[in-house]
Amino acid sequence: MSQTLDTADGALALDERHLSVVLDGQPRHFHYVWLRDNSWAADDRIAQSGERKLFTGSIPADIAPTTAAWDPDRGLEVQWNDGRAATYSPDWLRRYDYSPAARAARRRPATLWPEAAGEPPRFAHSDVVGSADGQLAYLDAVRELGAAIVTGVPSEDHEVERFAEHIGHLREVAFERVHNVRHDPAGYNVAHTPGELKPHTDLPSYDWPPSVQLLHFLTNRATGGESTLVDGWAALAELRRDAPAHFDTLVRVPVPFQLFSDDEDTWAENPMVQLGTDGEVRLLRFSNQLAQPLAAPFDEVEAFYDAYRHLARILDSGRYRATFTAADGDLVTVHSHRVLHGRLPYDPASGARHLQDVYLEFDDLMARRRVLRGEHKPLAAQPQEDA
């Protein structure tokens, strides 16, 4: 039978399969199996690394405390019915609280762009590569807005590769490690032409497309060729609100994409929209130029095209779009599972236009951000002299 929990910090109540403890005036609820699984006692952790040693499969199904008490300094002290003891500090319980409110606070949703979007925030190259605070501000912008521009990057061959090493690790793909984008009548990709590039994401022809792209303008002296960025997640939010059936179709129906050269090939078939476990958009694949013949069930084909047209018109409408002229030395960063990039047409006879791009993974940038914030190491639950 459960006990009534009072409102004093540290007040405990034990139920059949979980306990509750008051912290900061609010009851926090923790399952016994979860607490036992996350013990930091000496027998349950590898001392030199903090990694888990306890094998979850060995925890008894009837795990429960034989005693539980609250110490104001040490926190929750539990003697388990498997003969082990563990301590869980107040700070540790706060950090790993898995209540709905705590999980929602940790997620911090992305800021979607307004219909009349301005340019992404700009950061000086010397600040991003020269100071932890400057790099953290840049990474915060990429996390929240999905795009940022670094200015004053040296216009030197492969400088984009050197910049990438400051913030993450290059993602190798089937084509050039550092891809040159300039007018090339023999090029294998539409980016090598001077025509308009509709908003798109790169390499949906991988099951897991690269999630960050860096585009470094070594020189941009041609007439036209303004850069465009579109917040695809904002476009999908509009689609989901106004036409939920269309949104669901794009989550469900797989689309094949292919990019190839004389020597390489990439091919993948997936829905254009992928959701996370919370139902929010995690990944958008959109590349009109790389889409291959749809191989959906007969009854899905027209529904797919209705949904595709609807999304495509939003993406091409000018809403949620930033349009700007990149200067020599500008480096554009996009979270490419979210932000689509494109280009207006330009005149290749009017001046040089040459950029180089590379790919990274958003996970690595966010890991770098956690390191800079000092948040990457797990918090020990138990005082180290006990562990």
Image (tube, rainbow, N blue to C red):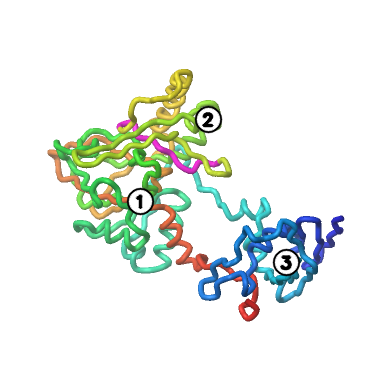
Which numbered mark, 1 or 2, is in the foreground of this view?
2
Q: Which mark is residue 333?
A: 1
Name the residue type under label 2: Asp
The quarter holding residue 36 reads bottom right
Of marks 2 and 3, which one's residue comes earlier in the chain? 3
Q: Judge by depth and name the residue closer to the eye, 288 or 217.
A: 288
Q: Which mark is residue 248?
A: 2
Query: Circle 2: is it few (<14), some (14-19), or many (20+) Cα within 10 Å?
Result: some
| Range of magenta residues | 280-289
Question: Residue at horizontal 35%, vertical 53%?
Answer: 360
Of marks 1 and 3, which one's residue comes earlier in the chain? 3
Q: Secondary structure at mark 3?
A: loop
The image quadrant where one finds the C terminus is bottom right
Report how many numbered discs are placed on residues in the image. Answer: 3
- The location of residue 174, given as percent across then percent down, is 27, 46
Q: Is residue 364 left or right of residue 197?
A: right
Tell me the CA gap for discs 1 and 3: 52 Å
Question: Residue at horizontal 28%, vertical 35%?
Answer: 197
The quarter holding residue 259 reads top left
Question: Residue at horizontal 27%, vertical 52%?
Answer: 216
- Classified by dominant secondary structure, the portion drawn in magenta counts as loop
Name the residue type under label 3: Asp
The quarter holding residue 47 reads bottom right
The image quadrant where one finds the N terminus is bottom right
Above or below residue 349? Residue 55 is: below
